[in-house]
Image (tube, rainbow, N blue to C red):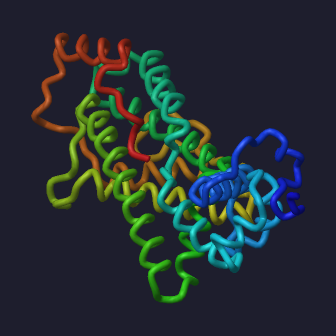
Amino acid sequence: MKTNDDQAPTGLAHRRRRRLSDEETEQRMLRAALDSVNRTGLTVSLEHISFEDVIRDAGVARSAVYRRWPYKDLFFSDLLRELAGGLAPAGIAAEESATELVRRVALERLDWLKTPELRHDLYVELLRQGALLDFETIHASTEWRTYLALHATFVGLADGDLRADVQAALATADQGFVARISAANERMAELLGYRLRPELGSTFETLTGLVSATLRGLVIMALSNPDVVVRRNRANPFGASGTAEWSQPALGVAGIAFAFLEPDPSVEWNDERVAGVRRALETGQNLGHRQPG
């Protein structure tokens, strides 16, 4: 006769025809906990995740769970490793919409490719709209909140294997994100005839990392200061010829971008190049994630 411990509290026991292995129990538990975190976002303490609720949602036997994790703290340590190893930060979920934004804004202003002043205005406009989209994506994303909270959680972990594992996973995620987005930013700069200022001796990875840090910092500020989200300035910064509504994220991102970028004097803007840029925008060819940010 089966005990209550060996039956799932949700009534799923009658659907199972075999006992779950310890490995299957582990995977179901971690998946149920990850789903819970992804619904609500991670808090630094993980106190909002109920061990008993995870057991129920996973549909596994309590006895099997406690055989695998005699103490719930051991489970939460494995959950932190799983979260850190599975995260892909940064606007990846919104990549398609960001790329479409770049294409739409540029295609609506193809005549701005004709002169250096108008090309600069185009880049300013891409940064203005793209930075705000990136900020809003991060601000609204539970995955991003989990990613930011993991960094805070890591700081409070005692030295040991868990801290080392989480640190390594976060570093890998950051490096992969920066490499991926910086490559796309470089392609967009080249398309619009911009280059890194040679006197800085820098890279697009550095530019992308600084922009990412700025957006993350603004998101953290916005948690306690909602004015960061809604404040707008009517301005024409960074040499723009016209005025527009500028958000704080856009001002921060564009300020960093134009500190690093300048028109490439080796690029010849003739009819052939303009036609090539038009084709790239119309087809999406050589368009990566977005402008720096």
Q: From the viewer's perspective, is 274 left or right of 49? A: left
Q: Position of residue 171 (x, y in %)?
A: 39, 65
| Residue 220, picture quadrant | bottom right
Total marks drawn? 0
Furthest-left residue in this view:
266
Q: From the viewer's perspective, is 143 left or right of 119? A: right
Q: Which residue is painted at 88% across and 55% down in the image?
A: 9
Furthest-front residue in this view:
1
Q: Which residue is painted at 55% across and 36% down in the image?
A: 94
Q: Which residue is painted at 38% across and 12% down in the image?
A: 282
- Taking depth in this image into account, of 265 and 183 the one nearest to the observer is 183
Query: Compared with residue 237, is residue 264 higher up or lower down, i.e. above or below?
Result: above
Q: From the viewer's perspective, is 27 left or right of 173? A: right
Is residue 228 visible to us here?
no
Q: Position of residue 167 (x, y in %)?
A: 43, 72
Image quarter (top left, top right, bottom left or bottom right) of the N terminus: bottom right
Is residue 173 visible to us here?
yes
| Residue 281, picture quadrant | top left
Q: From the viewer's perspective, is 267 left or right of 217? A: left
- Taking depth in this image into account, of 164 and 69 the one nearest to the observer is 69
- Taking depth in this image into account, of 29 and 76 the one nearest to the observer is 29
Q: Position of residue 274 (x, y in %)?
A: 24, 15
| Residue 173, picture quadrant | bottom left
Q: Which residue is painted at 70% across and 53% down in the image?
A: 32
Q: Position of residue 20 (x, y in %)?
A: 66, 52
Query: Compared with residue 4, is residue 118 higher up or lower down, i.e. above or below?
Result: above
